[in-house]
Image (spheres, rainbow, N blue to C red):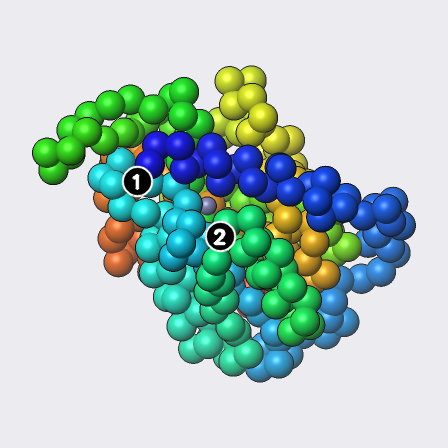
Amino acid sequence: MKISWRITAAIAVALIPLVAVPADHGEAAARAKIKPATPETCDPHKFRLILDVGHTSESQGATSARNDVEFGFNLQLTKLIGERLKSAGFAATRVLVTDGKARASLLKRVGTANDAHADFFLSVHHDSVPDKMLEEWEFDGAKSYFSDRFSGHSLFVSERNPHFSASLAFAKLLGRELKEKGLQYATQYTLPLMGHYRHPLLDKDVGVYRYDGLVVLSQTRSAAVLLEAGSIINRDEEMAMNSPERRELIAAAVTRAMRSYCEKR
Ligand SMILES: [Zn+2]
C-alpha cells in the first residue's frame, strides 16, 4: 500500500505522548554528558548487541516500487548482518524479530532490549518517500508506485537516548564505512518539502540525522541507532538493495563500524 510509509513514520511521532517523553529528559541528557557509554570496556564475545528487524509480518512497513514489503528487505539484511557480526566474534549478537501490530511492536521491541540489558540496539529499515511524491507506473501488470527522486541510506540517533553520544559515535563510524564503500547518504531529510519528516543533520559528511521522535531510539536504555539501509521506492536502488552484493557490503560496513566502536570503549 502506498500509504504505508506515511503510517509507519507517523506511528513513531504519534507515540511520543503515549510513551511519555521522559520527565527526566533533562537529567538523562545531563547524565549522558557525564557518564561514559556502556560498557566501560567492550569484549565482543559478551557485547549484547540487538539487531532489530524493522516492522513485523503483520505490519510490514513501506512497499517497494515493485510491490515487495519492507519487512522482507529488513529481515534478509538483518540476518546477514547478524551472521557477519557473529563470525567477527560478536557472539552475543541477537537478531530481534517482533510480531504484532506496528504501534504495540515498538514498545515490545524496546521492552525486549531493555529486559535483556542490551549494550547496543541497531534497528534496520529500508526507506521510502512521503505519499505526495509517489508516481504511478505499471509493474507486473499491476498499478504500482515509485519515486526515483531520492536515494541513499541514512542514520538516525535521538538526543533523548541516555547514551546519545555513544549512539552518535557509532552512527558516524557506520556512515564513514558506507561512504568509503562509495555510497551516498540520503540528503532529502533537510529539505522543507519533507515537512514532518525533516530532521536536523548532525553530520553532513556521513549523513547522521537527529530524530528524537523514534520510540526505538528514545526509549531504549542502551545506545541506539536506526539505519535506513537504502530506498526501496527508488526503482534502481530497489534492485541494488535486492542484490547479495549490496547486502554483503552493508553487513561488512556494520561489522567494521562495530569493531571500531568496541575498540574505542
Ligand atoms: Zn521502516
Q: Position of residue 119 (x, y in %)?
A: 66, 69
Amino acid type, residue under disc 1 in the picture: Ser
Please say if 120 is above or below 195.
Answer: below
Q: Position of residue 146 (x, y in %)?
A: 29, 29
Q: Which mark is residue 101?
A: 2
The image quarter in which residue 162 lies: bottom right
Q: Position of residue 257 (x, y in %)?
A: 53, 60
Residue at 59% from the left image edge and 41% from the top image edge: 12
The image quarter in which residue 80 lies: bottom left
Q: Is residue 15 left or right of residue 91?
A: right
Amino acid type, residue under disc 2 in the picture: Lys
Please say if 58 is above or below 131.
Answer: below
Q: Of residues 238 and 25, which is closer to you in this image?
A: 25
SS category of the residue bearing label 1 = loop
Residue at 58% from the left image edge and 26% from the top image edge: 196
Q: Is residue 229 left or right of residue 207?
A: left
Please say if 150 is above or below 124.
Answer: above
Q: Nearer the viewer, mark 1 or mark 2?
A: 2
Residue at 72% from the left image edge and 74% from the top image edge: 41
Q: Position of residue 182 (x, y in %)?
A: 38, 44
Q: Is residue 5 left or right of residue 1?
A: right
Residue identified by numbered label 1:
64
